[in-house]
Amino acid sequence: MGNKKQNVGLVREIITMAKTNIRDYMMYITLVCIMLFFAIQTDGGFLQARNITNLINQAGYVAVMAIGMTVILIIVHIDLSVGYVAGFCGAVAAILMTKYNVNEWIAILIVLGLGLLIGLYQGLLVTKVGVPAFVTTLAGMFIFRGLLNLSLQKTGTIIIPNKGFNALSNGFIPDLPIDVGFHMVTMIIAVVLVGILIFTQTKNRKNKLKYDFEVPSTPIFVFKLVAMSAIILGIMWVLASNQGVPWTAVIVGVVLVVYNYMLNKTKLGRAIYGIGGNAQAAELSGINVKRVTLFAFCSVSVMAALGGVLYTSRLQSATPTAGTAFEMDAIASSYIGGVAVSGGVGRVTNTIIGALVIMSLTNGMNLMGIDISYQYMVKGIIFIIAVAFDVRTRKK
Amino acid sequence: MSDYILEMKQITKEFPGVKALDNVNFKVKRGEIHCLVGENGAGKSTLMKVLSGVYPYGTYSGDIMYNGEVQKFKQISDSESKGIVIIYQELALVQELSLYENIFFGHEILKGRSIDWNETIVRATEMLKKVKLKADPSMKVKDLGVGNQQLVEIAKALSKDVKLLILDEPTASLNEDDSQNLLNLIRELKEQGVTCIMISHKLREITAIADTITVLRDGSTICSLDATERRIEEAEIIKHMVGREMDNIYPKREKREFGDIALELKDWSVFDPIKNREILHKVNVNVRKGEIVGIQGLMGAGRTELAMSIFGNPTGYKLTGGELYLDGKEVHFRNPKEAIKKGLAYVTEDRKGNGLILMQDIRYNTTIANLEALVQGLAINENEEIKVANSYKDSINIKAPSIEQKVGNLSGGNQQKVQIAKWMFAQPKVLILDEPTRGIDVGAKYEIYSLMNKLVAEGMSIIMISSELPEVLGMSDRLYVMSEGSITGEMLVEDATEEKVMAMAVKS
């Protein structure tokens, strides 16, 4: 009897959980469906270790740009210029390394600095002059596209010889010098990640219980932990059976952790959500709205520069077409990842899922040999469905 | 003739988890002014939304009898076509359009398939004359004051050939003059045969104007009082609203000991570059430690502008002259952040518009103005934050399931308490309260007044800006009267009478 009652309670809890978190769950389900669909269509090719590695390397530049974009979108601005900023920054890095023989790491630092300057320029236009972000960054699109073309006009595509630079989006973390048939370090990292996950989640839950907040019941909590651990171990195992964790994944991981911490744990993060929710109220609560907005523009441009570096590294060359339509992928990733169109809501962790959705579509359709015209349409349709669904569920 | 134009019978309306209306019976006689009162959340607005078709037929149970016939309104246009027009507290005018465009917005006069603008202007002028608004019909709505905008709304209702006019807190944002004007207009409409339902919190107006007063409490009809036979006293209405006798709306303070001057303004002048005129002229105001200073003035007198210009001037006015002293030292604030750091706090007039971040929870809103106090290294100490938010929730009685409740879901009174909690946590020396009890029910009002008394007893200084005369007289130790950007009077509360204050408030 008692057992039965417990089961009923559990079912009810699952239903209410599904109802309240339907937005997030839909996103995961969509991702899984897309992956399964392509796996079937490509006879498993999509889920092969090599392709998963590929997918991560391809998604990396979109992911970091989307993370920067998420912050801008939360405060209800937009940055349309990120694509050409990325292209231009990649070209500058290539020129520095080939023409001026600058060390690759210094070149990357210089380019990130360039991103910061671009962010300052656009951010000051928005905050001090009062030009709307849409217009400022649309103008930026023109300007940086021009600069990209100009910088590569004489040379055309620049091939980059620097190994370290190219490894960023093509290389893997080193392994221990013992052969166990798989990538040892990758699995060690996997175990550490799972450990961290279990530790932080349990601590978090205990804390919430201490304050009598509602928490999921034990079976659901355990199930969640097991499922998340399994996903981490599964992905890492696939990677380990290939060549290990790509450097791209490490970079995205670091960016993700930093932004997630910033948004959730710091004053700056509070300010960002506050401005997105109600800028006037935020100002009157002592938040320096202009300064935070300026920060958001700097951060998105630096992330665009980083995206440019990753993309250039991936191609091992800088081309005049780099950056075209990147802003569309970045914006779509953020919105698919659940940033509210009206601002004030959004998580970078979900943005990564959004980026995976977008890049899985690209990767899978490429594998299937689908024409690029159809690819754009499919992405557009998925994007608009995601946002429409978001708007509807938020209304309730 | 005393037949009923409207009979709402056994209306029940449920929202998930809440019974907003529980078997409500509501009868309105033809040609009367019927006031609907009740605490916030009593169900007044819900009842009117059922009537107007915002909640369509089928989503509630019970019958609406209008002119003796059962009505099944599916949408607002259904009720409007029968002559039922509702005017909401938040006016529904298009600011950038002209008066005549607004008046016939949604029911344009057509000639063939195109709009007949000439006829529109002629008819609009007639309507404006009826509501006694002397204004050029081609001027934009945004150039009118709130009071006159309200009149435009009524003109719009008249243009729809209104039989039953519903006004939801029409005077909430009006000054005394405009309110009187509006009430007179409602009386005139009554003469012309328009029945009027008025929702209001202002009991004085209600007792002055109502033929019948219906009190709602917790989704049920408590009583209907006939005000034509005998005079209904405010105390009686309050008793029905809260279900208990409330002999004193303004709690008494035990000791009144004032310390040094905490904040002082000297010859404070402010220029608004957008309106291109001086909005504050040589204002001199001071407040002592432990003192509540009231600033009374009509809408447009510059009270909120005064608060904003002191509080770091986020609206970008030009401060053209004068000095601001805190604890005897002159200070200059470039933004609200600096003002907060120096011990100022400002509970805004418009808590939804610029006071609270509605999509965030109580915890977030409570601590947002003083996160410094919770930061350890880089991160916010969330455990400490939860403790803080919980302690304020308990100590000032914010009614919510937990501090994780979104502020947007709270009632007006509880939202206001969150705003006050936010500033208490910032531990200011001077607290500026701008219309602290607007749109708040009597019970919550009392709690907020008591809280104010407690804060000044602890040595805080309070500047209370309010357009409600009884509140200013009931709560202040000393008060200033403002008119058209200048201070026109200062007096101790013992010397103040309503007549005296009003005389100064209309002085120019």
Image (tube, rainbow, N blue to C red):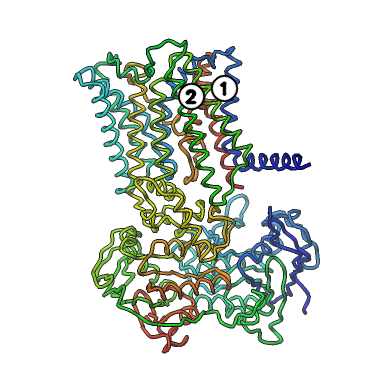
Image position of B133 (left or right of B334): right
From the image, tell me which residue sits under label 1. A35
State the image coordinates of residue B370 (x, y, percent, origin top left).
Answer: 38, 57
State the image coordinates of residue B488 (x, y, percent, origin top left).
Answer: 35, 81
The residue at 71%/59% (across/down) is: B19
Label 2 vs label 1, nearer the camera: 1
Quarter of the figure with residue B156: bottom right
In this picture, is A348 found above or below B100? above
Q: In front here: B230 or B461?
A: B461
Q: In front here: B215 or A266?
A: A266
The residue lying furthest to the bottom in this view is B495
- The subunit carrying tag 2 is A
From the image, tell me which residue sits under label 2. A359
Quarter of the figure with residue B295: bottom left
Q: Return the mark for residue B121.
A: none
Residue B119 shows in the view:
no
Distance of mark 2 from mark 1, alpha carbons?
Answer: 11 Å
Q: In front here: B319 or A349?
A: A349
Q: In front here: A331 or B127?
A: A331
Q: Secondary structure at mark 1?
A: helix
Whether label 2 touches label 1, CB < 8 Å = no
Image position of B251 (left or right of B307): right
Q: Tell me if mark 2 has few (under 14), some (14-19) or many (20+) residues whose alpha carbon lies within 10 angstroms of its own.
A: many
